[in-house]
Amino acid sequence: MKAIMLMFDTLNRHMLPPYGCEWIHAPNFKRLAERTVTFENSYVGSMPCMPARRELHTGRTNFLHRGWSPLEPFDDSMPELLRENGVYTHLVTDHQHYWEDGGATYHTRYQSFELIRGQEGDPWKGHVRDPDIPPLATGDTHTPLVRQDWVNRQYIRDEEEFPQARTFAAGMEFIRNNRAEDRWFLQVETFDPHEPFYTPLKYRSLYPHAYEGKHFDWPLYRQVQESPEEVEHCKLQYAGLLSMCDAYLGKMLDLMDELNLWEDTLLIVNTDHGFLLGEHNWWAKSVQPFYNEIAHTPLFIWDPRVKLQGERRTSLVQMIDMAPTLLDYFGIHIPANMIGKSLAQTIACDKPVREAALFGIHGGHVNCTDGRYVYMRGPATEANGPLYEYTLMPTHMRSRFRVSELQDVELADPFSFTKGVRTLKVKKTVPRSKELATMLFDLHSDPDQVMPLQDPIVEGKMLAHMRRLMEELDAPAEQYERLGIERE
């Protein structure tokens, strides 16, 4: 038995042909849906990138306790558990957050790993002289991240030099080298189609359009300030990169056909979250409400034990289900701390694994969906507090915690999942914005989420789901206070 996870970053469900998009050139995603089970109700959990990957490893939602972070010493890690039980684990990725302070304990959980350099502002190539950067639509020309990205682009010109191409090549090399072996798990993870939407001309040329404005393939995390022409251009840049992802997905499917891996290899194709490309007058993710363009994700699974293809599943699933699904597939005990569920029976017969799902980002909305309604609970106070982070790994995305952040820390009592370990309790301040107002949406009558619903009965039902899920996660007491929710 073997397993392959092909993970994209920032893959928009609503822009894929299997989910109804007719203008995107992505024939291999259509082909994928014909060969797998397609999930209709897959949602994010902890946002964004590394919190989602902590879920992938631990099978637990973590955004109520912590923001962006490494794996903690008390965390169960799915790849590590596989390795300890005789399953060889290998990671191939160009996701540059793995080698930053806030992600540094993830890739070392695999038995072996290959890191492909050059995505986004990865500090890869060293140039003392500033690169030539064209005028940008965002005006964001001289930030260190943008500067480094334009240094990197000087080494990424031909298609085979692009990090995504090198990532897939390395993943397929592993498969060819190990096709005759048993009990291995391969995670091929590309940063694309994450911004910047830099891609070879042949993919951008799939979307011809007249545009003579400033260079624009990297939107900022803010409300839209650009012209309609610039918005459309940037959206088509994303489309070109998505089509490149489709092409390399096709190469992987071709290899599975060639080696007949469908007979004994589980295949999961997923993403961490989507992205706003001007919808709701927003770019990107993380700072706005998590509308479905961000929260409602694509997911495709082939299970060689049941060999179901071309079918769809409506059960509500999340990233936290990936770890128990993989452990169960290899016959390995699922730790009690994993609250996600194996999807084996969901794949086989659409057996539900939950009534509702919780998702969000630390200090933002706490969101809950049952598949029909989405409830976004905002903070009850202007201060958006109290709010704390609980950690033994005090790092942010690209830095350690500042000394000033650690001068007044406390030791918290153990949580149910910390294995008797007390963590640092670090005060955090996240200003409350008008975007954090409490909202309720009915996805049946308002799929675009433009008309917040006023229905106390439905809100009460969704609040009951939220309270129950927070209790299951052993949410910190102050989160109830912050949200104005009474504990049971």
Image (cartoon, helix red, strand yellow):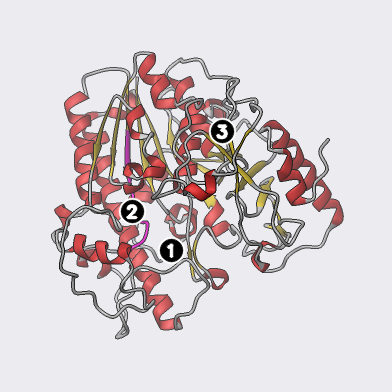
Whether residue 134 is situated above or below residue 255 in the rendered picture:
below
Which label belongs to residue 441? none
Which mark is in front, 2 or 1? 2
Indicate the quadrant where residue 256 lies.
top left
Query: Which three-letter amino acid code belongs to the residue tagged 1?
Result: Glu
Q: Are marks 2 and 1 in contact (CB under 8 Å)?
A: no
The residue beneath circle 1 is 22
Query: Which three-letter amino acid code belongs to the residue tagged 3?
Result: Arg
Query: Which three-letter amino acid code belongs to the residue tagged 2?
Result: Asp
Q: Could you tell me what secondary structure mostly forms the magenta stretch?
A: loop
Which label belongs to residue 60? 3
Q: CA distance from mark 1 to mark 3?
A: 35 Å
Highlighted magenta segment, given as a residue range: 187-197
Q: Is residue 227 left or right of residue 424?
A: left
Seen at 73% across and 62% down, the residue is 382
Which mark is in front, 3 or 2? 3
* Mark 2 or mark 1: whose residue is earlier in sequence: 1
Q: Is residue 338 left or right of residue 301?
A: right
Question: Magenta span has 193?
Answer: yes
Q: CA distance from mark 3 to mark 2?
A: 25 Å
The residue beneath circle 2 is 192
* Mark 3 or mark 2: whose residue is earlier in sequence: 3
- Quadrant of the snapshot with the C terminus: top right
Whether residue 5 is situated above or below residue 422 in the rendered picture:
below
Seen at 73% across and 50% down, the residue is 482
Indicate the quadrant where residue 26 lies.
bottom left
Q: Nearer the viewer, residue 314 or 397?
A: 397
For label 3, the crowd category at 10 Å Cα-Cα, with few meaning under 14, some 14 to 19 and many 20 or more, is: many
Residue reaching furthest to the bottom: 212
Q: Secondary structure under badge 1? A: loop
